[in-house]
Every structure is written in C-alpha cells, then in structure tokens.
Image (spheres, coloured by chain):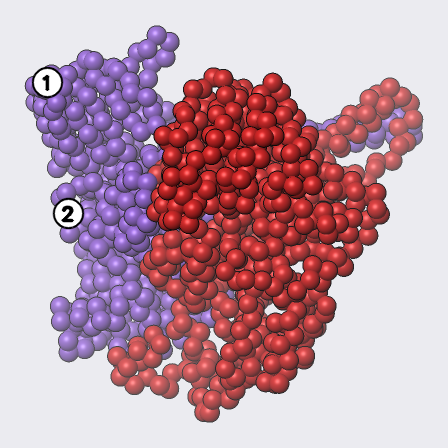
Chain colours: A red, B purple
Amino acid sequence: VENVRLVDRLSSRKASVGTLYLTATHVIFVENSSETRKETWVLHSQISSIEKQATTATGCPLLIRCKNFQVIQLVIPQERDCHDVYISLIRLARPVKYEELYCFSFNPKLDKEEREKGWKLVDLNEEYNRMGVPNNYWQISDVNRDYGVCDSYPMEVYVPKSATAHIIVGSSKFRSRRRFPALSYYCKDNNASICRSSQPLSGFSARCLEDEQMLQAIRKANPGSDFLYVVDTRPKLNAMANRAAGKGYENEDNYSNIKFQFIGIENIHVMRSSLQKMLEVCEMKSPSMSDFLWGLENSGWLKHIKAIMDAGIFIAKAVAEEGVSVLVHCSDGWDRTAQVCSVASLLLDPHYRTMKGFMVLIEKDWVSFGHKFNHRYGNLDGDPKEISPVIDQFIECVWQLMEQFPCAFEFNERFLIHIQHHIYSCQFGNFLCNSQKERRELKVQERTYSLWAHLWKNRADYLNPLYRSEHSQTRGTLHPQMAPCNFLYKFWSGMYNRFEKGLHPRQSVIDYLMAVKEETQQLEEELIVLEERLANLQKLQLNGNKVKSKQQDRSKELVLSASNNSIANTPQEYSIDLKSFPSRSPSQGDEEDSALILTQDNLKSSDPDLSANSDQESGVEDLSCRSPSGGGCLPSEDSGKDSDEAVCLAV
Amino acid sequence: MEFAELIKTPRADNAVLHRPFHPAVEGTLCLTGHHLIFSSRRRDNVEELWLLHSNIDSIEKRFVGSLGTIVIKCKDLRIIQLDIPGMEECLNIASSIEALSTLDSVTLMYPFFYRPMFEIVEDGWCAFLPDEEFELLSSVTDEWRLSCVNKDFSVCPSYPPVVIVPKSIDDEALQKVAMFRHGGRFPVLSYYHKKNSMVMMRSSQPLTGTNGRRCKEDEKLINATLRPGKRGYIIDTRSLNVAQQARAKGGGFEQEVCYPQWRRIHKCIDRFNILQESLIKLVEACNDQSHNMDRWLSKLEASNWLTHIKEILTAACLAAQCIDREGASVLVHGTEGTDSTLQVTSLAQIILDPRCRTIRGFESLIVREWLQGGHPFQQRCAQSAYSNSKQKWEAPVFLLFLDCVWQILHQFPCSFEFNEHFLVTLFEHAYASQFGTFLGNNENERCKLKLSQKTMSLWSWVNQPEELNNFKNPLFEANSLVIWPSVAPQSLQLWEGVFLRWNRPSKFRDEAREEMNKIIDYNRLLQEKVNSMRKRLAQLETRDRVQENL
C-alpha cells in the first residue's frame, strides 16, 4: 500500500509518508523520503493487537500495538486498503500452527554443526554439577523418563536421595498437575536448597503420607537445619479459595518441622490488567506529572514487581543467612514459582549474574520446568485469558536490581530488552511450546536455532562495562533493601517506552564506557606493537629505514566513534502555544488548508535522525521553511483583547 | 565571647550516635560556637562528625528514664540521633544547640569566623566580575553597554552596581524604567545567543496597575533588543489569572497595545509556600520507612515536587526554543523577578550555552544570575524541609533549579564538565556553609556586610585543582550543541542523590563511580603512554635516518 503515513505518537506533527508492505513474516514500512529510506520492520508474532479507527479526512487510521511495547500508528488513504491490511494482519498475527512461526523459516545461514553447538551452549546438567549435585543428599531421578509422572516437568529431575520413586509418585499424585517438589537451586556452602512444586491437593483435610515424606526428605537433605520453609507465593485469600476446589496449601500440623509462609503475589489475570493499565499510562499524550504518577500507582505494576522481589529476598535470606531450605509453590508452580525461584537464585549466586549464567537461569527455572511460554505470550492463537507478562516481570526485577547494584551484573539493559523481544518474536526455538515434552515432539532443536548462541555471538554488545569479575559486588549474595525509600523502584522507560527514543537519556553512559573500553583494548595492543618496534629499533640501531606504520591514525578514529553519541538534539513540544503559530496564520481558511500547512510543517520539523550531525543547520532550515507558511514568524492579526488572546494561546 | 553563654554544657561523654546504615557508635559530644562535634575513639580508628549549627533545621528531644535522646534534622536532609546519658546534660545540650542554630545576626555566622587552612590561589570574590563578562560580549556585538546607574544601589536595591543594557538607552531612561518595574528591576541582559544574536532579558513585572499605566522608556528599552521587523516573546512565569490579579496591587503585565511587537506567553511556575510545602511533603515521603509501594507512589505524587520540576524545565525549554529555534528575543519575568525568573533564565542558558555546562561557566552562571541577580538566598534558604517555622519567604527555589540541572545532566551525562556531587555540594552550601558566598539577599547587603573582606568565597575553595577533581565528570566531552532535554514524566526522576541520600546505602553507587573513573583513567594513561612511545619512536627513526644520510 502506498502513501501511508506513519504517525509519531508523541507529537502529532511528525509523520512520515511511505509504503507499507506485508510479507509472510513481517510488516514493513519504508519511508519515501529519498535520503533516508528509513525502514520499520515488525514481526507478525510481535503484534499484540490491531485497531481500526474511524476514518478521517486524511485516511483510515490503523493502530498496531506490539508485544515489545512498540505502538505504530498508520494512516492509510483508502478505507478499502486499510480494511484489507487489517484483515490480513489479524490472520497473520494469530498463527494456529507452530510451523507458521518465524523460527521455522528463519535461517541465519549456519550449518548443522553450528546449530547443534548453539543448542549445547546452555547445558543444564553441567549447571547442576556446578551447584554441586548430585552428591550425598541429592540425585537425578529417572522417574519422569518419557514424562510419565509429570508431562510439564523435564525428563531429568533432581530430588533428595532418600526420596524413593514410590514417594515421588505418591507425592506427585497429591500435587496439582503432578508437579511434585524438585530441586531448583542448591547452595553448596551450607546444603540449603530451593525446591519447587505446585500446590498440594489438600482441600480442607486431605493428607498424603508420601508428600509429607517428600518434604521430610527435602528437610533432611539439609542436615544443618531442623525445619523447612514452605513458601506459598499466593495471597492467603486465593490459597484458601483453592481449598474449596480440593487444592490449597500445606497444613503445618500434618507436616513435621515446616514453617509455612504466604507471600501475596497476585495471579496472572491481575498482572495482565496491571500491565494493560500501565501501558495506557505510557501511551497518554503529554500527560502531566500527576497523571503519570497517579496512573503508575493505580496500575499497581511496581507494587507487583516489589512483591516478587520481596519474595525473592525472603527466600535468599532464608537460604544464605539462616541456612534453611525452602519449598516454593503457587497454584500450578509454573508462573509465580518460576519468578520467585529465579529472583532468589539471582540474588544468591553471582554466577546467574553473568551472561551465560543468566541464560542458564532462564533455561533452568523457566524453560525446563514447563513455564507455558506459548500460552503466556500468545505465540499461537489461543485463550487471551492465558496471556500474562510473567517473565516480563522477572526481567524487570533484574533491571531494578541492576539499577541498585550497577557493578553486579555482567550484562547490560540491552541484553534484557533483547531477551524480552525474542520471547515474543518466535525467531528462535527456545521459547516455543509449553513444555519440554512438546518441544521434543516438535523437534525444535533440529528445526530451529537457539537464541542463546545468537546472543553469545554478539556478547560484546551486551556487556556491562562496570562489571569486573573480581569486584566485591559481583561476589556473594546481594542484599537489597526492601522499603521503597531505600530501594527506589523506578518506571522502566527503556522497556515500556522503548521506541520513544525522545524520552530516554540522550547520551548513554554504558555506550560511552563501552567505546572507551574498546579503545583501551586497542591502545593496549598498540602499546605492545610499539614496545616491540622500539626494542627492535634499539637492537638494530643501524638501518632505521622502517617506515612508520599507519597505526598513527587508528586511535583518532576511535575517539571519534566514542564521541558520536551526541545524538539528535531536537526540542520536543514544550508548549502547545508555540507550535500553534504556523497554523494560526492568516490563511487559516478551511480545514484542508490548515491541515496542509501542518503537514508541510511536519516534513521539515527537525526529525531526530536528520538533524543528528548539525544542530545549527537544522535550526536554520527550520526557520526558512517556516516563513512561507506563516508569512513571518509571528502572526499578529488576531490580538483582540488581552485575555482572549491568552486563551487562544493556551489551547 | 557570647557563644560561651549559650553553651551550658560544652561536652558529654558516653554519648551514642545513630545514623541510618551505620552501626551505632559511642563517643564524646562537644559543642563549640559553630559546631557540634562527635568523636569516637575505637582502638585503631578515630571517627569524627562535625556538624555546623547552621545546618540544623530542627531538633527534638525525648527521654526514657534518665537517658535522653536528641534527634537532629539537618538542612541537607540528614537525620541523626544522639543518646546522651543524664537528663540535665541532655536538656542543656539540646537547648544550646537550639540557640546556636537559630542565631539571628548574620555577622555571628560561621563564615565570619572561619579561617581557611588552604592557600588561596585565586580569590573567588574576584573570579567572576561583570567587566569580564562584558568583555566577552563586546567581542561579538557592540549593541550593549555597561551601566553604573545602580552603583550605590539606589535605583534597584536588589541589582548589582553594574548591569548590561542596550547601548541606545541612557541612564536617565533606565531610572524611569526602574520606577515602572517592581522593586526597580528594569530589564537587563541575561544572555546573548551568539549563534543568531538573539537575546534573553529579565526583569520584574511592569507596574501597570488597573488603569493600564505605561512607560515609553520601558517600551523603548525592550524594543531596543529586537532586530528590525522582528518580534519577541515575553515569558511571564505566572498564570494569566495571577498576572491579572497582580494589577489590583499595582503590578501587571505588558499590554498587547503598548508592546505590539511582543507576544506574551504565560507559563505558570509556583512560588513560595507552595514550593516549601512540596519540599516538606517530598522529604516526608522519602523518610517513610513503610514497605508499602502504593503509599510511596501516592506520597511522591502528592508532594508535587516533580510537577514543579516539569513546569520549570518546560518554561526554560520554551525560552530556549524561542531564542534558538524561532530566532526571537525573549524577556522573562514573574512578579519580583528574583525566583522563577532566574530559574528560567539560568536553565535556558544551560540548554543553549555549552559554556554553562563547564564548572567555571556554571559558577559564573550562578554568580551572574543568582547572586548578582538578587535571589534572596538568606531568606529562601533560612530553613529547609524539617522546620516548623513556615515563613512566607522560605522556599526551595535554588534547590529546584539544581534539581532541574541534575535532570538535564541525567539526560546528557556526557555533556557536563561537573558531576552530581558538584550540584549536591552547592545545595549544601546554599543552606549552611563556612563560606560567605550565599550569605545576604543581594549584592547590596553583601557589600554592607563586607563579605568579600571578612569571609572566604566558596569558589576560592572549589576552584583549587585538588578539590576540582572531586567535581569533575569523567564522561565529559565538550558538546557545542544546544541540548534539548525531555520533559515527559517518563524522563523525569526523583533526585536520589539529594532526597534518598541518607536513606540508602551509597556504597554501590560509589563503587560504580569509582569503576567508571578507573576505566577512564586507565584509558587516559594508555593514551599518554602510546603517545610518548610514538614520539620516542619517531625520534629514533629520524635520528637513524639522519645517521644514514650522513
């Protein structure tokens, strides 16, 4: 479709005209503007909703909201075209078969061997070995071979040595979806562990001997402690309601030596609507500070993030400081439990704060333990009530921690954002399906590529320049503060307003430091070369006819690249008053005319990408273009009474 | 010495000091005329806390048995607690601190007693003279002149003796204009934009009153700043409503009829007690140890602090935009022209002028716009967030300005020569200091107090090379462009460095800063090494060549 306008959401004045293409996998918008030909690509799998709005004089607006929080507003001249695009996108954005997903057609031109190597980058067995299991207390159980006991669990599960197959199977029958207690994290130093499961089918009074034995076995696998924490991550009310359905929570009287604890994290439905509310706040056009803060509070989003973090902090404390093992569950044990276990692991073990370790963590607590990626992130067309930003919240928790502990993580914000993007993109096979079993059946590893290999290949982009493996922040457990006045939970505009570059800091400290580090490395190399040459020269002394190498200019280039980050300096709309001047010109006749002036204005209104190099130029350009439309800078005609005028101005 | 009379108990042993995120320490408390000193000697290390009495905002005492506790809340927002055994000692100490922290005579303040331990390389009192500023200006334009019409402060008590005005306006006219402007603050040059030779001026409100008085000289003066055929903007920092109401009290605004070449824009920036209330509420929110997220956010919102930040920044951006993008001259004023006006003019300069983003340039900006510009520091910064006095003239105007600068710094972390610590230091010294810089309400008062002879300037201390290092931003790379900050709520943040400074462990941030310095220092070191190595190589090579040729 041609002559489509892409509207900038923040300032309605900015829009670019271009052509819209639909391919089998992407929506592509190419700008007409000859110098830039800027392209916007959107994967169909990223589309979360499409909205066709009422046709206006300029065309038919189409609003596309993406799962990576991009919002694209298009205006298509013909209503019919708009409808066609709308219908096609609705179909394309909701694939019904896995085979339709991008990862099955995506080919990064790697051979079979490389693909296999990519999938082997993250090896969970290796990870459990690193933790120190199997050992005297823990072993691999083959009870779930062929997914016979629990189809959403991995094939290989670590359980206490004293838990026999009989106990495990018995316990699994007493747990929702048979998700019996299994090891998530083991702390070598004090034998304390984090185990995970689903809720027990206790109802009001039911008991299960094997389940009680199972918990006993977990407690005994930590000889240093005489009790076990059982953490139910749900609000107490929710857990009690579950009892009526024959589910519920552990009765402290039935299980010996457990301490039971509720941590109120809300369910997926609450989280979904919370995100929805927060995104509405993000989408507001020029909100006031109060609108924004009130909206943020009202969405409850940060409250939920804090609840997850607090749960993680509680567990990490229990394990690291008290040396007590913890069993974590929620209802099915695949959402809140995954969040909480992974936050706790991240706090406890510096390994998970490295790039590789973080991949392992997601693979361990999310992928292998059957987090329902397909349902939660709507990869295939499904029940919209199953969709919820569960892993997004975990990723945000990590970001909040990064803000508090700037040297503690090997990776940077970009790493998190790219992982979030690919959880929805379906470009790689890692997050397909709802369980390991489904992925094996689909032969994901043979037919698609692994995201981890892709990220690992580009790891230089994801490094946190402040990270040093020997730094004190990178060692040991992190102890975040809990009150909001001690641990400032911030709105993550880098994620939720990701595509509104104008809102972000215009210069990135991380990028700057990365450039400096790169230059440092090259300087180091050059120093070695220079030292060698100097030594040679001194040795030979005779014929110094060696021409200077070209290395001289090298570092100069680098300095330049480092300073390149003075990005686009353009004012945003500080005052509606000012902007309204051109359209308030004498020629303000009929609608169309003033609209025309507006678009003219749009075209030259300094686009960030255009004015990148010279602020001066863009300023001048701005001026000269303005005059024909308004006939001078300031239209004066309409100054009637004083008060009147001011009212007009404020409109 | 009269201080001795105020100090009933100069010393208390076995006192215990409590601070957040520090273990309690036992030690000796001493009171001197200007300081509260707490020192503890534990085997190997001596820990001392020196607190200026003038930094104390409020003091509370309570007793449990004979153990007294004094809670001291400081103007820099820190809260410390001292346990003092003995009811009488505790009462004595509390009342002494109270008396010493509320001395009403300026000449009893510490700056008049402070003797620096460092050698003065450059006297800060003479570092930023108007003549130098004018010299810079004269190198690019000859349309302005220095006027000494106010040399004895008779025309405008809150202006400095020397101001920059259009060349075509003589002193006689200035005197007439001064009669027409609130407090005599006639329009003066605030900033000259070299790029397009547009200017920003500031003044106070015109005294039009209800019957629309006008002043030909005033019109002539501000029109003198316009290019032929061009128009200008008047940014009034009050809402239209407030401006209209001001007419009843003899004030007012420029009527369109009398100033046809000017377009007026009203950008409301709050004043006085509204700002003070806002600060009090914000600090209360920041000290709330509750774990409840909703409460935190709603308190943050209710404080309105960030709303003020957004308003001020928006007005400043608008002024800058008029000058740089619209190519128009700008006049900024509110009512008195000593508060919101200065916020707008100084922030606009930071946006427009790269020089203001250097340490020296920023100091010069503060001297020009705030100190010589007649911001009443002594009144505004008399008390901070914990005081119950609630005087009408107290307001965190300067702190808001610093916060706005921090917001821009946060968005352009590589464009400023100074770092956050520099801004925090200025905040501290504006409220309590050993230096005389921020004493008095205007140059007139400072002259009378003979501050430049009797006290030390803050700049004398700051500008020593070894001190400057602490204020330098390692990421700085001169950026000659205009920098346009975002004023969207998503882009504005709570200034943790001031408001949460005492409520969170600073260790991790400090470590990050250290790490940053390390990375950059190492890079510089390598660069130097490589350069010197190259030089040596080049020398050797040419020598060889010379030898060869021989």
Q: Is residue B419 visible?
A: no
Q: Nearer the viewer, residue B255 or A504?
A: A504
**Label ID, residue B390:** 2
Q: CA distance from mark 2 to mark 1?
A: 33 Å
Q: Residue furthest bottom?
A: A590
| Left or right position of A639 against A463 | left
Asked if the residue at tag 1 contacts the one at tag 2, i.e. Cβ–Cβ closer than 8 Å, the answer is no
Q: Nearer the viewer, residue A42 or A446?
A: A446
Label 2 element class? loop
In the rendering, at what x and y percent does residue B173 appear?
Answer: 25, 68
Give the amino acid at mark 2.
Lys
Q: Label 1, on which residue?
A: B66
| Left or right position of B145 against B155 | right
| Left or right position of B476 against A573 | right
Above or below residue A63? Residue B116 is above
Identify which residue is drawn at 46% across, 82% down: A583
* Chain holding disc 1: B
Identify which residue is drawn at 21% across, 23% down: B82
In which quadrant will I find the C terminus of chain A?
bottom left
Label 1 element class? loop
